[in-house]
């Protein structure tokens, strides 16, 4: 890495599966033995750390200029993909992928990384998102297990990241605040204050655990099993607090870069998008995290800047319902091309930066896509998707049936396995994605 790091790349961790076998209601392994085992696990699993950046625009792009007309390795680039032609061998474009039974127009925007079914149904509860699922299985190997970012985002209602219980995780939309979180150590007093707060939380958890274990002796077998699951959750949270405390005492990365200034004008959507993409790349480059999500909330974006001398005639959402009006289509194409150019600049950044064994792009999966196949008609099938980097064999258009789509979660399983997660199922998947090879 080109960033000067003054701390170990990862704290000691134990794989989720191993920790659960050793915990439950019994005592965890002694701390020193625990650390020794964690170091052994890390040395086996992390010869080349893998990373993941997941990007979504909740209004998507115009499908006609995005999807190629031909498939395979010798496909012809579509008008939009020509903006990325320098990196043709570094990405794969997909067609014919979507989430089964995930319909309802804009209601699907929170399900892009979960694949949860029927988001408009009564009593709907979302499921765990791809980033959180990966973080659960990989454990905390970096200062931040994941970063959840947003641009122009409606924090109360939208996010790409969701917990196992279907709870929204608010996105960070301030690059300046994110920079401070990643790279500004703070005073000794502030660090001590945060450590004391973590210690207080741990003490509360211990008290809850002790009292509940005493209560469990009077319960039947079924209720005890439920309490066992509860104790496991308690111990997992305790471990996260312990790890957080360890990271609080380690120096943050030393970088030679001025902190960014937040862009408050929501009309400057693409400037804000580029700024957050660069912050995401910096977080990955410094190994502050290995999993990042970034949601571009086009739905919440008012009249916005298309070019330096041109603004859209209406808000992004209204514009997306173009009804084939030529002026709306022309503006949307300019917006889409700006997104493709931002992706190109991101790829350029990730190829210039050296990772552990080569270009950072080669160890970073970058997924760009949307929950919208066609925002004009509220269609949630045949989603626009491309995947770059991550060590996959790219340079192709993988075309699946556009009428009977393959599960997008199959792609997610392939990505999870590449990330090092031993799982053959996620969401609505039926296996790994055919044709995508490392």
Image (cartoon, rainbow, N blue to C red):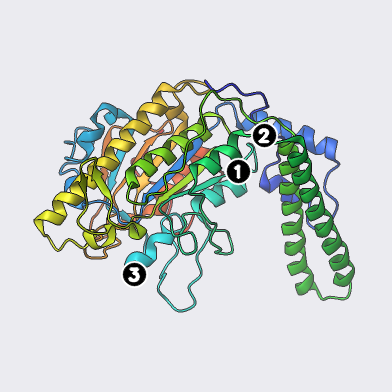
Q: Judge from the rendering whether residue 65 lies leftward or rightward of residue 411; answer left or right.
A: left
| Location of residue 271 with respect to 116 vertically, above or below | above
Closer to us: 321 or 28: 321
Identify the secondary structure beneath mark 1. Answer: loop
Please report whichever mark, 3 or 1, sits nearer to the chain's N-terminal start: 3
Q: Dot 2 corresponds to which residue?
A: 185
Q: Which mark is residue 104?
A: 3
- Badge 2, how many Cα within 10 Å: few under 14, some, many 20+? some
Residue at 25% across, 51% down: 61
SS for callout 3? loop
Residue lying farthest bottom?
A: 122
The CA distance from mark 3 to mark 2 is: 44 Å
Residue at mark 1: 145
What residue is drawn where x is 26% and y is 50%?
A: 400
The kind of secondary structure element at disc 2 is loop
Note whether residue 9 is visible.
yes
> Residue at coordinates 52% horizontally, 33% vertically from top-left?
259
Q: In this view, does 204 lie to the left or right of 378?
A: right
- Expressed as whole percent of the image width and height from the top left, the position of residue 108 reads 38, 63
Classify the position of the C terminus by image quarter: top left
Quadrant in the picture for residue 254: top right
Discs 1/2, front: 2
């Amino acid at each position: 890495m080109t960033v000067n790091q003054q701390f170990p790349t990862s704290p000691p961790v134990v794989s989720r599966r191993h920790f659960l076998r050793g915990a439950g209601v019994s005592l965890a392994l002694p701390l020193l033995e625990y650390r020794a085992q964690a170091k052994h696990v890390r040395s086996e699993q992390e010869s080349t750390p893998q990373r993941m950046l997941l990007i979504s625009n909740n209004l998507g792009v115009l499908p006609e200029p995005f999807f190629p007309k031909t498939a395979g390795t010798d496909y012809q680039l579509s008008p939009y993909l020509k903006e990325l032609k320098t990196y043709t061998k570094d990405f794969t474009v997909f067609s014919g992928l979507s989430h089964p039974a995930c319909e309802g127009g804009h209601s699907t925007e929170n399900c892009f990384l979960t694949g949860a079914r029927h988001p408009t149904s009564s009593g709907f509860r979302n499921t765990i998102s791809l980033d959180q699922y990966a973080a659960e299985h990989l454990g905390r190997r970096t200062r931040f297990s994941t970063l959840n970012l947003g641009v122009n985002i409606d924090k109360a209602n939208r996010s790409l990241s969701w917990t196992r219980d279907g709870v929204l995780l608010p996105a960070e939309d301030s690059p300046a605040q994110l920079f401070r979180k990643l790279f500004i150590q703070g005073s000794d007093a502030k660090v001590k204050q945060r450590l004391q707060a973590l210690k207080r939380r741990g003490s509360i958890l211990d008290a809850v655990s002790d009292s509940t274990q005493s209560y469990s002796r009077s319960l039947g077998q079924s209720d005890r099993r439920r309490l066992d699951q509860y104790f496991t959750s308690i111990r997992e949270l305790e471990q996260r607090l312990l790890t957080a405390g360890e990271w609080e005492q380690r120096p943050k990365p030393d970088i030679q870069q001025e902190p960014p200034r937040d862009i408050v004008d929501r009309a400057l959507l693409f400037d804000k998008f580029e700024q957050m993409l660069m912050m995401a790349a910096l977080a990955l480059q410094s190994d502050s995290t290995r999993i990042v999500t970034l949601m571009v909330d086009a739905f919440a974006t008012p009249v916005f800047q298309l070019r330096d001398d041109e603004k859209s005639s209406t808000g992004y959402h209204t514009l997306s319902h173009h009804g084939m009006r030529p002026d709306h289509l022309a503006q949307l194409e300019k917006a889409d091309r700006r997104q493709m150019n931002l992706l190109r600049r991101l790829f350029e950044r990730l190829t210039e930066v050296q990772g552990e064994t080569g270009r950072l792009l080669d160890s970073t999966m970058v997924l760009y896509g949307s929950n919208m196949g066609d925002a004009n008609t509220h269609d949630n099938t045949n989603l626009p998707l491309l995947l770059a980097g991550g060590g996959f064999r790219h340079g192709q258009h993988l075309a699946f049936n556009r009428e009977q789509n393959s599960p997008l979660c199959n792609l997610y399983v392939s990505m999870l396995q590449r990330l090092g997660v031993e799982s053959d199922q996620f969401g609505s998947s039926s296996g790994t994605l055919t044709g995508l090879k490392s």
